[in-house]
Amino acid sequence: MNKILVITFLLLTTVVKGGEKDEFQFGMRMGLNLADQRFEGKKEFDDLNDGSWKFLPGFTLGFMAEIPLASFLEIRAEALVTSMGRQFVNKTDKDNWIKSKIAYGYVQFPVMAKLQLGGENIRGFVNFGPQFGVGVYGLYRDKFAIDGEKDTENEGFKFKDEDLKRFDLGLSTGIGLEMKNKVEFEVRYTHGFSDIVDWEATAGGERPDGVQKFTNQGLAVTFGYKF
């Protein structure tokens, strides 16, 4: 029994210690963001329009700051510019297809708890916490081919002109590795809670029967560096 207690204590000490307590750190992160939106009836929409929803490739770029609370726990705050949105693909054949993209640019502010384990050379970490976003721009982009002739149409828009809400509340969680040279890699999922459509501002003035809210989601693969 005593041996079990000693082994358990040593394991806990190794996990919790993970090196000495960090100092305040500041850095940058950037990477690829695969965005999509959730709403009821996606499958029915696909069947009706002979197409399918795809992730919308985009970017995420910004700054991060970490405030140490213990050797294994930090508060991580970020300010990011991230592209969100959705993409619908309808393809009849190789010469006739259309890709309809709606891209939203958000300034996002994740505030997360960062749990980290490992030694000085390499550490694993998990981030988890709320995220606040503000929409700043939008873009419609249609790429299409008709009888083999390809073309592209772009049109920018403002959130209020398209009956969209600018504020977006969500939850971010990620897992990654941090190296001794202050380089880190992370995979992060963002789950939105806010309905981005301002139904009261639409022509009907209310949410149509059977229509559920539109919410953002994204999967980001990023590279970070701390100064």
Image (tube, helix red, strand yellow):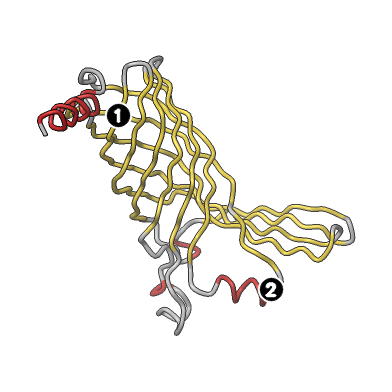
- Nearest the camera: 33 or 19? 19
Image coordinates for residue 51, horizontal then vertical, percent: 69, 67
In what element is the residue under mark 2?
Answer: helix
Q: Which mark is residue 49?
A: 2
Q: What is the three-letter code of the residue carrying label 2? A: Asn
Q: In the rendered image of this protein, does residue 205 appear above or below residue 55?
A: below
The quadrant in which the N terminus is found is top left
Image quarter for residue 20? top left
Image disc number at residue 117: 1
Name the outermost residue toward the left.
2
Q: Where residue 11 sits in the image (x, y, percent)?
A: 22, 28
47 sits to left or right of 186: right
- Name the residue located 40 percent from the left edge and 80 percent from the top edge: 206
- Name the image quarter holding residue 23: top left
**Label 1: which secondary element:** strand
- In three-dimensional space, the C-alpha distance between marks 2 and 1, rounded to whole angstroms, equals 48 Å
- Residue shown at 46% from the left, 82% from the top: 210
Q: Is residue 3 above or below residue 95?
A: above
Q: Percent from the top left, x then y, of residue 72? A: 23, 29
Q: Quadrant of residue 54?
A: bottom right
